[in-house]
């Protein structure tokens, strides 16, 4: 036992003294593996430069992945983990548990649509049967701009060939209430006609990659002749759809085609007409797999 300890101390002494150099990280290439309703595989191909004239036999690589400090899952190395002398590659797979995406989404919204992704791990290797670990990891930041894309939305309602109703000065804001997310919409509803117009409801719907992601509806109101009224609508985000949307977002190359549309119920000529207003469409993307 004393001889084994002496050899381990000698090897560690070489590492500390610089006789054995640590591998240098050259680059990291990320790509998505299998993505389904349960989990999402993030593959990290790490290029290392081993300056030593001998291979370093790693026994294991264990990683944990965090998104805004939310623990999303774990991972490990794929294939051969021996780092050869010179330039070599090491592949790590991290498994994001999709059931944790709701918790992540709340932090993403609270942080201004920003997320810091961190992969923290340890490289393990054996020295005469003893396992030693060296910490490693990397991080990146992603950002979406959902509300920024919505800004400036204005809608008109046509009655008998006239822009009878205009919705202008629209402001969108995120709000988080007891772990649920919502979009608060404030707008001026303007009546351009010389008579008052009763409105039964205004219904907002948000779709992301074809998924009904959120909706909100006002109570009835009357807009006075040639006047306007400030109206607030709360679009409640359906958190049960976050995981479903995430899968489509990743499979679509980290792109989301979104749309926001309105229905308005207007009382006209003694009858309530339900008018569908042409939706406003926009896109947003992330760059997790393209980050280096």
Image (spheres, rainbow, N blue to C red):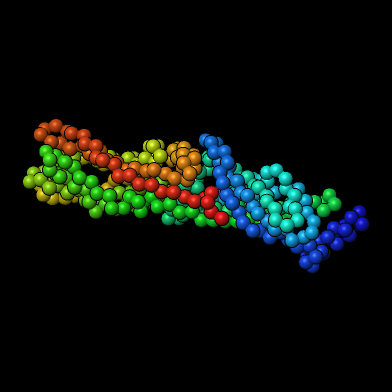
Q: Which residue appears at 12% of the width and 40% of the height? A: 161
Q: Is residue 148 above or below residue 195?
A: below
Q: Which residue appears at 56% of the width and 44% of the height? A: 32
Q: Position of residue 110 (x, y in %)?
A: 44, 53
* Extreme-left residue of the structure: 194
* Extreme-bottom residue of the structure: 17
Q: Position of residue 136 (x, y in %)?
A: 66, 56
Q: Which residue appears at 66% of the width and 58% of the height? A: 25
Horizontal relation, residue 58 to residue 91: left or right: right
Horizontal relation, residue 87 to residue 167: left or right: right
Q: Is residue 39 visible?
A: no
Tell me the quarter of the picture where residue 39 sits.
Answer: top right
Q: Which residue appears at 18% of the width and 42% of the height? A: 157
Q: Is residue 77 visible?
A: yes
The quadrant of the picture occupied by the C terminus is bottom right
The quadrant of the picture occupied by the N terminus is bottom right
Is 148 in front, or is 71?
A: 148
Q: Position of residue 42 (x, y in %)?
A: 58, 45
Horizontal relation, residue 111 to residue 264: left or right: right
* Extreme-top residue of the structure: 271
Is 72 in front, or is 148?
A: 148
Q: Position of residue 82 (x, y in %)?
A: 75, 49
Q: How many discs appear? A: 0
């Amino acid at each position: 036992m004393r001889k084994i300890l002496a050899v381990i101390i000698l090897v560690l002494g070489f590492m500390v003294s610089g006789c054995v150099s640590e591998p240098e990280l050259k680059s990291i290439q990320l790509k998505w593996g299998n993505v389904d309703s349960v989990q999402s595989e993030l593959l990290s191909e790490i290029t290392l430069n081993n300056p030593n004239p001998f291979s370093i036999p790693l026994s294991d690589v264990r990683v944990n992945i965090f998104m805004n400090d939310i623990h999303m899952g774990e991972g490990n190395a794929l294939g051969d983990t021996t780092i050869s002398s010179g330039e070599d590659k090491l592949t790590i797979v991290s498994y994001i548990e999709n059931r944790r995406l709701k918790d992540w989404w709340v932090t993403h919204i609270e942080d201004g649509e920003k997320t810091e992704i961190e992969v923290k791990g340890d490289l393990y290797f054996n020295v005469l049967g003893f396992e030693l670990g060296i910490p490693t990891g990397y991080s990146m930041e992603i950002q979406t701009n959902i509300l920024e894309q919505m800004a400036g939305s204005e809608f008109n309602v046509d009655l008998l060939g006239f822009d009878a109703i205009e919705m202008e000065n629209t402001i969108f804001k995120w709000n988080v209430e007891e772990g649920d997310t919502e979009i608060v919409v404030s707008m001026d509803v303007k009546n351009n006609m010389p008579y008052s117009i009763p409105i039964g409801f205004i219904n907002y719907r948000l779709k992301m990659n074809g998924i009904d992601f959120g909706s909100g509806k006002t109570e009835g109101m009357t807009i006075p002749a040639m006047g306007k009224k400030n109206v607030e609508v709360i679009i409640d985000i359906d958190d049960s759809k976050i995981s479903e949307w995430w899968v489509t977002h990743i499979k679509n190359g980290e792109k989301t085609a979104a749309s926001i549309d309105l229905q308005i119920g207007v009382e006209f000529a003694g009858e309530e007409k339900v008018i569908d207003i042409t939706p406003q469409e926009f896109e947003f993307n992330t760059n997790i797999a393209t980050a280096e």
